[in-house]
Image (cartoon, helix red, strand yellow):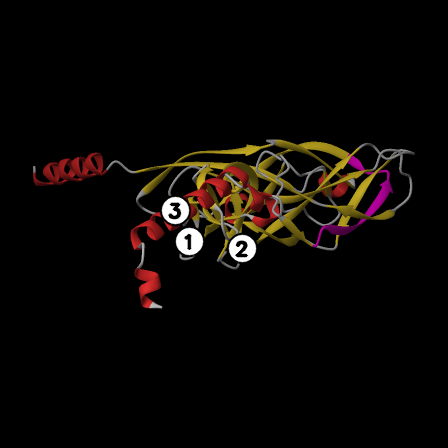
Amino acid sequence: MINFFRKNLPEKCLALIVAIGCWIFVMNDQNPQIENTYTVPISIANAPEGYQISKDVETVKVRVRAPRSLFSNVDETNFKAYVDLNGVENGTHELQVQTVLPSGFELVSVGPTKVALNVDKIEQKQIPVRLNLSGIPGDGKVVASVDQSLQDITIEGPVSILNQVTAAVGYIGVNGNTDNFSVTVPLIAVNDKDKEIEGVRLLPKTVDVSIILARGLNTKIIDVKPTLMSDLSNDYILKSVRVEPEKIEVSGNIDIIGNMTYLATENISLAEMTQPTKKTVKLLIPDGVTASIQEVTVTVDIMKKDTDTTSHTVTKETDNTKN
């Protein structure tokens, strides 16, 4: 038996090599390696809880190579592309796209190779509820009082968007109304310019409002006076204070509003201010008086004291004392 395998051994080895070569040739000819490209959605792995994640692109082009026969049993869903957020914190990041391919497939290219992601922490904050009334009641009546069920609500969303929101606003039309009425008012989140800000959740989304109308009330235009507390840091000086609007219309019995010359705002603390600041503050409206708006915007302009100038002044005063 051993002699059988040893007999003509070189010829047998050559025949085996030729057979293997023929098999490879036939397989490559009948089932050649080909390439194809698939559009694959990008998924997120190890996403941190309590964050909103956004990508600059949603899909990548994955080009693969494999024997022709393998392509008949796959489509886009068999290929995976993802970015791994393990250890990623708040902010913008550029991460490598990783892929998972079916058995027998070779990755040729992926594009783009990196994806920019914004990881934004989800938080909550309290904001005031502001009601804007429009129109004129009928039958010579005016709005005597506005009673709202909520003064503040909670909003929830990504910090970058949350920081833009200053108030929740509801709009009420009173044009032509002659009787008292109640209404549930939908609220929208707005910035300091009353522009709607999307991407946050309002908790709750509505406020219940009761409108009381009255006849025979007088109206007048009076000033708005910001009330500033005297707690500004000694390192800063107050340059100016502006209020918008500067004047508003109030209505009420003549014996109440007859001597009124202005409406004051709630106290405005300056203790934490280190730069010019714009704040939305409520008006202090006396009982029996109705104002056309409930809040105003106060802009406080401050500046840091000039240390060199202060030091020079103190030195000069000391010298004068010596003389």
Q: Is residue 131 left or right of residue 199?
A: right
Q: Are marks 2 and 1 in contact (CB under 8 Å)?
A: no
Q: CA distance from mark 3 to mark 1?
A: 36 Å
Tell me residue 199's x, y (percent): 61, 44
The circle drawn on residue 123 is 2
Tell me residue 58's x, y (percent): 55, 40
Amino acid type, residue under disc 2 in the picture: Glu
Q: CA distance from mark 2 to mark 3?
A: 30 Å
- Residue at 50% x, 43% y: name it: 27
- The image quadrant that residue 8 belongs to is bottom left
Let me know if residue 209 is in the magenta part: yes
Residue linked to disc 1: 89
Let me know if residue 280 is in the magenta part: no
Tell me residue 168's x, y (percent): 65, 45
The circle drawn on residue 232 is 3
Label 3: which secondary element: loop
